[in-house]
Amino acid sequence: MIRSPLLEAVPGSIHGFGTRVEWVPPPPPELSQPAQLAPTLEALGAPGARVAMLNQIHGAQVLRADPAGPLWPVGPGDALVCTVPGVVVYVRVADCTPILLVGPRGVAAVHAGWRGTAAGVLQAAVERLLDWSGQRPEDLRAAVGPSAGPCCYEVGPEVVEGLARHAPLELFLHERPGRRPTVDVAAVNLHVLHTLGIQAERLPHCTVCDPGFHSWRRDGALAGRQAAFVGLWP
Ligand SMILES: [Zn+2]
């Protein structure tokens, strides 16, 4: 489990970016929170927490985890906000960028692959989190977790075009003579956070070339997933 020093400094919260070591549940449909999550919750410092998850669809839909409603999954979407202490929310990734947002009155977990990033999932998540929690941008801290890095993430022109809606090319595009360009999706999301006035940091590691992570690009259809968890924890 990897932690962000910036998020760790927010009292009353827990978070962690998983690696391939932590067990991650299969995608929905599932009936209820699996018992195998218990050791991960212990490692997070939130033993016995209720956990909420999404049916991820690579879009920009933001949902809210309400303990009175269904949590497993909350529904189809790619960002999950929670304003209630005692509930941990998470997103599953393998090369897509996980982003965690933490404030004293609300948190969010965001699944931002290139499609979600191009669709503005992070901006949508920040807007809903601020709205639903009554917080201001300066109340929030954010961390952009491990994902496919510019060392490995070769893309076509549609990806460059989609990302260019949100950040200047020189921030994310890595061109190489005679080869397809690579992009830095995490850099785009970090730029979005800074533009929104949110203190944010980026964690190292490329999920493709670091064997400590699951990678869709490296392992194809057999790839597992890692999860990024966040919650208010009294
Ligand atoms: Zn790499």
Image: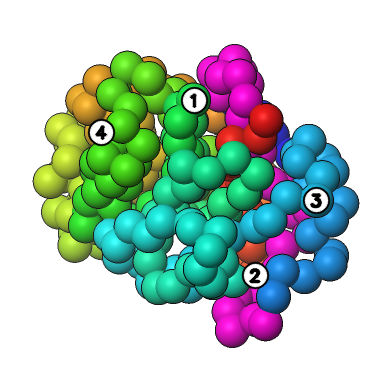
Between residues 36 and 227, which one lies in front from this camera angle?
36
Which residue matches tag 2? Answer: 223
Tag 4, which secondary structure? helix
Relative side of 125 to 212, left or right: left
Mark 1, mark 4: which one is toward the viewer? Answer: 1
Q: Which mark is residue 46?
A: none
Alpha-carbon span between mark 2 and mark 3: 28 Å
Q: How far, Cα to Cα, is label 1 from label 2?
A: 35 Å
Q: Which residue: 37% across, 60% down?
A: 63
Q: Amino acid at mark 3?
A: Gly
Residue 172 image offset from top left, x and y in percent: 28, 36
Circle 1 residue: 104
Q: Which mark is residue 48?
A: 3
Q: CA distance from mark 1 to mark 4?
A: 21 Å
**Earlier sequence position, callout 2 versus callout 3:** 3
**Given the image, on which type of amino acid does mark 1 rest?**
Pro
Q: Position of residue 28 (x, y in %)?
A: 58, 79
Q: Residue 24 lies in what quarter of the image?
A: bottom right
Identified by mark 2, the residue type is Ala
Q: Residue furthest front?
A: 68
Q: Please, what is the three-letter code of the amino acid marked with disc 4? A: Val
Which of the two discs, 4 and 3, labels the residue nearer the N terminus?
3
Q: Specify start and end residues of the magenta stretch as a single range.
A: 5-31
Q: Is residue 5 visible?
A: yes
